[in-house]
Amino acid sequence: MSPWFVYGQPPGEIRISATFTGTRAIELLNDLEKQYPVRFYYKEEWFSQDILNVTFRDNTLEEAVNMILSGKPYTFRIINQTQVILMPRQKWLYWLTDP
């Protein structure tokens, strides 16, 4: 017997619908990992003080991450459509320009 993995969305298209009010950023990221086939990579210290109020209404993963990081000095890259690497913008620029 072969195992079947069923998601409510087509492979490669993660769309997020959820509301978070007064939620710690780390808790929000953990909740998204539990509810969707996505994994976030980051250092907890970067987001330990952040409290978010955000509503996702059928947003793509990219849109959702942009909303989470709005106004913060961070950037991200999505790899294989399900892995999100969060990083301070300055470190990312250094990494891109370092020979």
Image (spheres, rainbow, N blue to C red):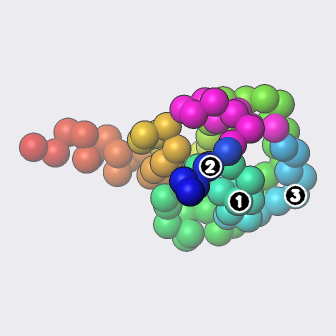
| Circle 1: residue type | Lys
Identify the image quadrant of the C terminus: top left
| Circle 2: residue type | Phe
Q: Is residue 11 magenta?
A: yes
Q: Is 93 or 6 nearer to us in this picture? A: 6
Give how far apart the Cα atoms at labels 3 and 2 are.
33 Å
Please tell me whether mark 1 or mark 2 is closer to you in this view. 2
Helix, strand or loop at disc 1? helix
Give how far apart the Cα atoms at labels 1 and 2 are.
15 Å
Q: Residue 67 lies in what quarter of the image?
A: top right
Residue for badge 3: 22
Q: Name the residue at the left extreme.
A: 99
Please tell me whether mark 3 or mark 2 is closer to you in this view. 2
The answer, for residue 49, to whether it is visible in the render is yes
Tell me the crowding category of disc 1: few under 14, some 14 to 19, or many 20 or more residues within 10 angstroms, Cα based: few
* Start-end of magenta stretch: 7-17
Q: Residue 17 lies in what quarter of the image?
A: top right
Determine whether label 3 and label 2 are within 8 Å by CB.
no
Dominant secondary structure of the residues highlighted in magenta in the image: loop
The label number, if any, that marks residue 5 in the structure image = 2
Residue pictured at 67% horizontal, 45% vertical: 6
Instruction: Find residue 34 and report its horizontal and vertical position in percent.
Output: 71, 59
Residue for badge 1: 34
Tell me the crowding category of disc 2: few under 14, some 14 to 19, or many 20 or more residues within 10 angstroms, Cα based: few
The answer, for residue 63, to whether it is visible in the render is no
Q: Is residue 47 above or below residue 77?
A: below
The earlier-in-sequence mark between 1 and 2 is 2
Q: Residue 19 lies in what quarter of the image?
A: top right
Give how far apart the Cα atoms at labels 3 and 1 are.
19 Å
